[in-house]
Image (tube, grey):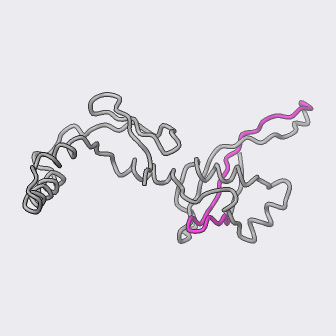
Amino acid sequence: MCIGYTVVQAPGLWQIYDVQGHFVRLEEAPLETPLIDPTDIALFAFGVFRILRTGRVLFESGARAAVTARISQGTISLLRGRLKIGLHARNLKMTETAAKHMLEPSRYVPLQIQKRAIRFGKRMPDPREGKGMFRYETDIYKLRYDKQRREYVHQKYKFEVIVRESDWTISHFKYFY
């Protein structure tokens, strides 16, 4: 399964992109490489096994493995978080409390905006430490009427959504200054 891709910017420097093609971060090779790397040992053992089993040359598999790039675990988890398989506005569910808040005109937030907050917002653990629950936070703009100016203005808010990721159920959402 593809969770992102890399583009070589310079020797030892890669640009990391998620599945949608959005730039995630730059990743660079470590400053020093160990004399014997555990990955090299595993590749060597695999090569020896292959020689004994099929009689093929060791360098056949070693040449292909030498081209791979090492990406940090932080980047891999960030790319997996961006993938969000199965997330679609039609698949989002709500708890009874969240559904009641959607009926209030002052608290209503369209499901497409909530989906975008989940897909592209900053992911963090649920503050109430619910099992499988995560909090997503992003900035949104809401059009409101300014009585002093007598015109509509775009007001910036922080928007948070708390979601159970196993079935994409929204248990809480709110926006604030």
Q: Position of residue 107 (x, y in %)?
A: 80, 55
Q: Where in the figure is residue 108, as x and y percent of width and height? A: 80, 55
Residue 49 horizontal/vertical position (percent) = 11, 61
Residue stretch in magenta? 149-171
Judged by its main secondary structure, the magenta piece is: strand
Nearest the viewer among 143 and 129 is: 143
Please tell me whether residue 4 belongs to the stretch shown in magenta. no
On-image quarter of the N terminus? bottom left
The quarter holding residue 105 reads: bottom right
Numbered marks: total = 0
Q: Which corner quadrant holds the C terminus?
A: top right
Q: Nearer the viewer, residue 87 or 173?
A: 87
> Compared to 129, does 9 lie above or below?
above
What's the residue at 20%, 42% (across, down)?
66
Choose top left, top right, bottom left or bottom right for residue 87.
bottom right
Q: Position of residue 122 (x, y in %)?
A: 55, 49
Residue, x 40% and y 47% (percent of image)? Answer: 75
Horizontal side of 48 relative to 140 (left or right) equals left
Compared with residue 113, is residue 135 higher up or lower down, i.e. above or below? below
